[in-house]
Every structure is written in C-alpha cells, then in structure tokens.
Image (cartoon, rainbow, N blue to C red):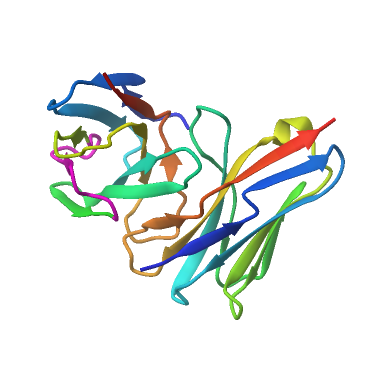
Amino acid sequence: DGGITQSPKYLFRKEGQNVTLSCEQNLNHDAMYWYRQDPGQGLRLIYYSQIVNDFQKGDIAEGYSVSREKKESFPLTVTSAQKNPTAFYLCASTPQGNSNQPQHFGDGTRLSIL
Amino acid sequence: GENVEQHPSTLSVQEGDSAVIKCTYSDSASNYFPWYKQELGKRPQLIIDIRSNVGEKKDQRIAVTLNKTAKHFSLHITETQPEDSAVYFCAARVTGGGNKLTFGTGTQLKVEL
C-alpha cells in the first residue's frame, strides 16, 4: 500500500552489531506496528505504538527496541541481544489504535547475518 | 492472549475449483477478522475482513464466514485462477487490544492449470 516506506530492503548484520530498520508513513496514521515473519510462520508482533511518544511490547520484544518521536516514523533497532535476527521484518500502520480498521503494510526489510 | 490456528498449511486446487481456508480463534472477545494475501517476497495485502456483528461478507469471488459460537471463520475463493496462488493469512483482533492482530500460520494456495 502506498504511503508506508521501509528501508533498506535488504540488510546484513555482523555479530555483536546493532542495526536499525526504518519505517516512515505519510498516511497520518496514529498507530504503527512491527512484525517479524519467519518461513512457514505467521507474522509475530514485536512492538506497537498507538500514539507519538508511547509504545508497548508485543509478543516477541526481547532483543529489539523502538522509538516513536514523530508520528510518521517508527524505527526498529535489532540489538546484539537478538541471537536469531534473520527474518523478514514488516511495518504496518492503522488510522487509530483502538478501532477495527485494517492494518496497511510496508514492503518489508529482509535482515540476514553475515 | 489470543491464539489463532489456520488449516490447511498447503492447498492445491485445479483452476476453476473453489478453495476454502479455515481458522479458529481462542478469545471470545475478538471482534475483527481480516484476511491477507501475500505473494512471495512481498507485503501482505488485505483482501477481505469481517466484523463480529455480521456472519458473512462477500466481494466478487471471495467470501468470508464467521461463526462466533464455534469461534471459527473461513475464507472461500470461488472460480480460482492462477493469480490466486499465494500465501493467505487469517488474523483476529481482541477488543481493546490496541488493534493488535494475532495471525494464523498461513496457507500456501496453489492453483494448477
């Protein structure tokens, strides 16, 4: 869906290194989400933010960190504490955090270990 | 928390046949059920969704049914075409849960000529 931009498309991480994945949206959406997708599995929620300057842990937050300093931006940092970071990472947004409105996804970032 | 199970994990049909994918959920407070289609290496795209106050919704060749009592919902694709080949995910949202979605593990649908 247009309006959600993830970068880079591919990212490689060295052992012990932190890396940051970018997610920007120009849809004026309040809520943003980060998911991890592994082969043969569904999407699992890492972190989500319903409003600027606020975020909550999802189901698999360990080894990840986020910030929400601006409405349009929700970067995800994969820290060295995440021992198995290889996955496809998807960012999503929705107009409001507590409404039955569809989540719209970015094109994803594929993270691999060097 | 919510748990969503999806079956089958793979489904192969002949072009023109119908395909049915089923999901069950655990939390009776869930009130919103979207279905996403994901082609290889691409983003999931919403194809249809249903809210708990309706039992069925249809959009051209795609329909979704919801049985709140049994806590299951299904995706029906009629007159399948090769371009329907993809992975399909169901999801469920619990009321007041910050619009968090819990996803099923996906169904790889292959439409054969």
Q: Decide which of A114, A62 is in the foreground and name it.
A: A114
Task: Give the residues in magenta.
Answer: A59-74
Q: Residue at x 71, y 46 (%)?
A: B11
* Residue A68 lies in the magenta stretch: yes
Q: Residue at x 27, y 37 (%)?
A: A84
Q: Is residue A86 shown above or below B66?
A: above
In the rendered image, residue B75, in percent from the top left (x then y), is placed at 67, 55
Horizontally, is A73 left or right of A28 in the view?
left
Q: Residue at x 60, y 81 (%)?
A: B69
> Does residue B74 appear anywhere in the picture?
yes
Residue A114 image-quadrant placement? top left
In this rendering, the count of numbered labels is 0
Q: Residue furthest bottom?
A: B69
Q: Main secondary structure of the magenta part?
A: loop
In the rendered image, residue A43, in percent from the top left (x then y), is placed at 42, 46
Q: Decide which of A110, B80 is in the foreground and name it.
A: A110
Q: Residue at x 29, y 30 (%)?
A: A24
* Residue A15 lies in the magenta stretch: no
Horizontally, is B30 left or right of A83 in the view?
right
Horizontally, is B111 left or right of A19 in the view?
right
In the rendered image, residue A31, in percent from the top left (x then y), is placed at 30, 48
Q: Is residue B22 shown above or below A24?
A: below
In the rendered image, residue A48, in percent from the top left (x then y), is placed at 26, 50
> Does residue B59 appear anywhere in the picture?
no
Q: Is residue A56 shown above or below B27?
A: above
